[in-house]
Amino acid sequence: MIDTHAHIFLPDFSEDVASMIERAKEQGIRHILMPAINPESVAQMEMIAERNAGNNDIYLHPMIGLHPCDVHEQIPMWGEHRWAQKLENWLNEYASLDHYIGIGETGLDYYWSTEYKKEQMLSLDMHFELAKSVNKPIVLHNRESTHDLLKAIARHQNGSIKGVWHCFNGTYEEGMQAIDLGFHLGIGGVVTFKNAGVAEVVRQLPIDKLILETDSPYLSPTPLRGKRNEPAHLAFIQKKLGELFELSQEEVEEQTDLTATSLFSL
């Protein structure tokens, strides 16, 4: 299995990162993809990846990006008039490195505040242009910003953009619009939540456009809601997809692994 979105570099795992990775391996996880959140997370990802470098049973892959919720925090650190250039320089520093397999996580988030819409969009535009220039997939965060996010994808799509709508929880029409624009949909723990309505939508979507993710340490799947999430829990999401599509877990694993391997050139 491939966990295409896990923040295992966060302090939530500082006490047991080695055993957490071992549990993932025991569950059949072979790749864990780590989207960056901010500059601090890069050093954390590099450290974990370096410690795991000799482990040929499971591979950890970093990405480079600034989370939309971190844009407003970086502006005062980088300077109000220089932050955009600083962001561009920082992204370019890592994006061409072979072991950075994607651009993200970026996107839009209007849940906490709409005060920084303009700055979030500027950051997102930079990530899109970078993804085009280095020909790597882009990982998009979306919270209460679907309309603007889909418009941004359409605006940038020149036939070369590929990526994933991370933590998909939209409608069938929104999901198909993203797919028609060349994107895949990341399916995580929310698909197992009884009253979220995501499962009913996902079962209508083409399974070859879906990839699995945990978003660790967040959004633990049922029956582990409220507990820290980790890559080993991916099996619960895989099982749910099997139920939705009336496939065996092996068939779901084969299809989603094939899709993720192709998308991220694993």
Image (spheres, rainbow, N blue to C red):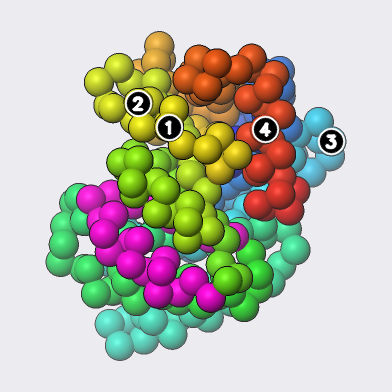
Q: Is residue 70 left or right of residue 46?
A: left
Q: Which residue is mark 1?
A: 204
Category of crowding for the residue at label 2, using alpha-carbon neighbours closer than 10 angstroms: few (below 14), some (14–19), many (at least 20): few
Magenta residue check for 60? no
> The N terminus appears in which quarter of the rendering?
top right
Residue 46 point in image, percent of width and height: 65, 53
Are circles 1 and 2 on residues that touch, CB within 8 Å? Answer: yes
Residue at 81% of width from left, 35% of height from top?
Answer: 55
| View extreme (top): residue | 223
**Can the viewer see residue 265 in this picture?**
yes
* Quarter occupied by residue 54: top right
Query: Could you say whether the residue bearing mark 3 is in a helix, strand or loop?
Result: loop
User: Which residue is nearer to you in this view: 71 or 255?
Assistant: 255
Q: Which residues are magenta?
A: 137-158
Q: Which residue is mark 2?
A: 200
N-terminal-most mark, 2 or 3: 3
Q: Is residue 200 left or right of residue 3?
A: left
Which mark lies nearer to you, 2 or 3? 2
Residue 82 point in image, percent of width and height: 36, 86
Which mark lies nearer to you, 4 or 1? 1
Which mark lies nearer to you, 1 or 2? 1
Numbered badge on residue 255: 4
Spatial separation of the CA atoms under disc 2 and disc 3: 38 Å
Residue 106 point in image, percent of width and height: 43, 60
